[in-house]
Structures are given as C-alpha cells and as structure tokens.
Image: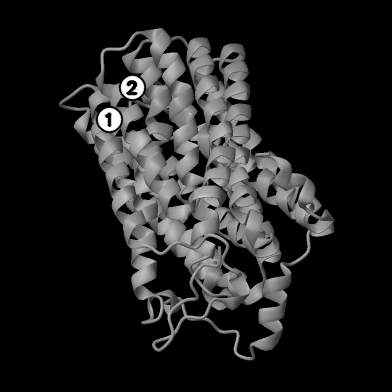
Amino acid sequence: MMFQWFTSLNKVEKRTFWACFSGWGLDAMDTQMYALSIPTLIALWGMTKGQAGILGTTVLIMAALGGWIAGILSDRYGRVRILQVTIAWFSLFTFLSAFTDSFWQLMITRGLQGIGFGGEWAVGAVLISETINPRTRGRVVGALQAGWAIGYGITVIISTIIFNSFPADTAWRILFALGLLPALLVLWIRRHIQEAPLYKKEHANVQDQSNSIWDVFSSPYRATTLKAILLTFGIYGGNYVMITWLPAYLKLALHLSITNVGGYLAINILGSFAGAFLNGWMADALGRRKTFMIIACCQALAVGIYTLAPINLTVTLLLGFVLGTLQSGTAAGTGAFIAELFPTRVRGSAQGLCGNAGRALGAVMPTMVGLLSVNMDLGPAMGICACASYVIVVLAAMMLPETRGRDLSQIVMDENRPAERAKI
C-alpha cells in the first residue's frame, strides 16, 4: 500500500514527521504570500514584471545562504535547535514585510525571510532523513512535500478571503502580517521533538566539532556536491518559474478573476499534494535516479503544453493538476537523496548548500521570465525557461549514483575510499 509506511513508524518518528511536515507547510504559507501578492503590488506600486522577478530571485538567493549557514550550525549544535531558530526567523521577517512601503524595503525583508526559509528546509530534511528507517525513507521524506501543498493551499484560501473582504492596499499587508503565526510551532517542537539518534551518536564520538564552511568542497565531496547542486538547480529553476509566475499568468494572461485564480490554483495544489506521495513510492520502488528522470521528462512535456499550446480553459484547469503533481514529484525527492549522498559529519551543511544553492541558481529563471516577457507573451517565456530547467534535471540525475536503501551511518567518503554503494 502506498500509505502503509505511516503505520510502521514509531512514536518518535511520527512526531518528527509531523514537526517537519508542519514546518514545510508553514514555510510554504509564508513564501507563497509573496507570489499571490505580485499582481496587487504591480498595480499599487507600479512595479515592473522585471522587478517582481528580481524580488522572487532575491529570496531564493538568500535561501541558499540561509540553508548553508543553518546546515553548518545544525552539524555543530543539533538539528532540532536550529530548526526552531529558522522557523522563528522566517515568521518574523514575513510579518515585517507587511509594513514595507517600497520595492527596496520589501526586497530587504523578503531577502531576510529567505534566510529562514532555506534554513528550515535544509535542517528539516536532515532531521527526518536521520530519524527514519532506510527502507521507507523515500516515502516518508517525500511525503513532507505534501506539507508544502497544504501550506500553499491555506494561503490561497486566506488570500482569497482577505482580498475579497478588504481593499487591495490593505489586504496584502494583512496577509503578510499573518505570517507571524508559524512561530507558534516552535513551542510545540521544544516540548515534543528529540534530536536524531544518528546525529547524537556521531556528535558524541567526534571530538572536534568545528566544521569549515568549505568542507563540502573538499576533495572527498567536491564532485558529488557540484552534481547535486546541478540537479537541484534544474528542479527549482523549473518549479519556481511556475510557482512564482502562475498566479500572475492566470490573472494577467488568461484574465481570470481573483476568485477563479484561487480555484485554478486549488487544482494545481491538489496535484502538488498527490505528487509528494507519488515520488516517495516511485523512489523506493524504482530508485532515486530513475524517478527524477521520468518525472522531469513528463514535467517538460506538461509545461510545454500548458504554456505554449492553444488549449482552452477546461484543459488548462485539468492540466494544472498534472503540473502540480509533477512539480511536487521532483522536489519531494531531493531531501532523502541529498541526505543519502553525504556522511553525518557534513550532512547538514551539504543538505543546506546543495538544496539551496540549486534554489539560488534556479532563481535566475523567474527573473529570466520577467525579462523575456518584455518582448514576448508571459506564457511562452514561462514555458521556455521551465522546460530548459527540466532537461538539466535529467542530465544531472544521470551523473549521480543510486542511493536507494543506503544506511546513513555507514557512509564513508575520503580520498582512498568512495562512498558506500546503496544496499537495495
């Protein structure tokens, strides 16, 4: 059964799952507030599409920095402690975004929010990967991506209500102010979540806990690090094109009302929810590499049809579900896969760097869409950038090793001994 894995988890594993699931959901809630506010800010502030793209790119670049820093700190001070810090951080700066009055002010608060956004993802992925049994790791960690869909869905519902209840110049501020609510999750984590046993064992046995920020670029890890960054660059480059620009595309290109935009996004989000479970099942059944390649190829085809073909609104609605499934399907696999590529002493920093450097590089794509849309329609600009990104996913997956079933405690990498091969 696709969902039988949950019943096999013990109490500690279930609590850790729900903490990370909620963290990802609230992360999505705060992050997607921006995407849903783009059309309003363009109208109120006279922002260009290029400036809107730059704002989206800024938060993703800062997420790369935040993920790397949080990962290093989690290797030194523990996964659970740093997870709490990152959630409180992104909640605070989302809230402060409500009080900005210009493009430059919002870029500062959004950039700082991105530090916590990237850090939360990195630390949560490591924590859950080190807690769960290898045989179900793909499904459990993949299922966390459904938390993103839940958070995104909550934001769509809240934003639809707020924008229909208040004037536009007030509504977007109320939306961002609600971004402080995720900080409440920190209180629950402090009471109920334990440190990963694998981390505690490694931390107790290692005398020198001082990791360099450049450890992941040392000779044992360098090639794997660069290939993993290339993989996440392709994944997030394509996904963030759609996540950042889809609300604007539905409103500005297809001329849908706010209520109809919410309905179309709801279908896309339902697909994202399903995609998280699909990826986990495929990754444990077929292997990590094959799953990435299959889903990326399907994704490029679906995005091409959605943005470039002359389809009607009904097909657009239905295809939105497929797009959501495939978007979530690629992103859901990165948490477990990156964790399985590196040993425990650098796993946090590797997860933070590889996952979020890909976000930073991929952040160029939303900006490219904004710049290309000056000379072409928004749909074709989105399609070209997204499809190019998914080709990169296939190429990177071909270069990386298969890791399905790998025991994280047995990964050893040095100049004379390669990483342990996966145990299927």
User: Relative to 361, is 74 above or below?
Assistant: below
**In x, y percent, where is residue 163?**
56, 17
Residue 178, given in percent of the width and then of the height, sits at 65, 34
Determine the CA span between mark 2 and mark 1.
8 Å
Q: Name the foreground residue: 43 vs 187.
A: 187
Quadrant containing the N terminus is top right
Residue 48 in view here: no
Which residue sits at x=47%, y=81%?
413
The residue type indicated by label 2 comes to Tyr
Badge 1 marks a residue whose secondary structure is helix
How far from the left and from the top, in percent, is residue 408? Answer: 60, 70
Within 10 Å of disc 1 (Cα), the crowding (few <14, some 14-19, many 20+) is: many
Give above or below for 398 relative to 294.
below
The residue labelled by disc 2 is: 306
**Which residue is at a point 39% across and 12% down the rendered structure image?**
315
In this picture, residue 253 sits left or right of residue 278: left
